[in-house]
Amino acid sequence: MTETCQDILLTILEELVEGQRKKFKLKLSDTELRKGYANIPKGHLEKADVTDMVDLLIRYYQQEYAVEVVINVLHQINDKDLAERLRRKAAEGGW
């Protein structure tokens, strides 16, 4: 069975430990985005668990751009291994 974009994002973000997850949310709420996109408000992210974050990412950025945003934020919090794994999975999935 082929993994969906949501499945991949969920798997990757579940690997973040609590401290990394807090940094991820902080960076996600103010990361630089393409023109026409808005940051997810901090209030939406504060109490969001991983499932909620994935839902917000897809809702705000659609699948393809959500993957790009997550890769960029993972780089910003210095988790280059997870970023590279997500990049490879995204290429395999075609997004």
Image (cartoon, rainbow, N blue to C red):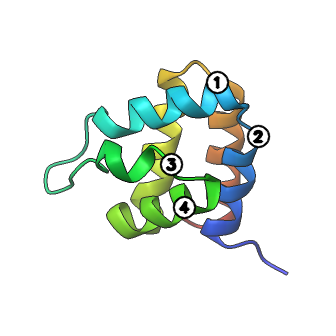
Q: Is residue 47 left or right of residue 94?
A: left
Per the model, the C-alpha gap separating discs 4 and 3 is: 9 Å
- Residue drawn at x 50%, y 67% is 55
* First-in-chain label (2 vs 3): 2
Q: Residue 82's x, y, as percent? A: 69, 35
Q: Residue 69 appears in which quarter of the rendering? A: top left
The numbered disc on residue 52 is 4
Q: Residue 91 appears in which quarter of the rendering? A: bottom right
Per the model, the C-alpha gap separating discs 1 and 4 is: 17 Å
Between label 4 and label 3, give the one nearer the viewer: 3
Q: Which residue is mark 1?
A: 19
Q: Which residue is mark 3?
A: 47
* First-in-chain label (2 vs 4): 2
> Disc 4 marks which amino acid?
Asp
The numbered disc on residue 4 is none
The kind of secondary structure element at disc 4 is helix
Q: Residue 90's x, y, as percent? A: 62, 57
The kind of secondary structure element at disc 2 is loop
- Residue drawn at x 70%, y 54% is 89
User: Pointers 1 and 4 in contact (CB under 8 A)?
Assistant: no
Q: Which residue is mark 2?
A: 15
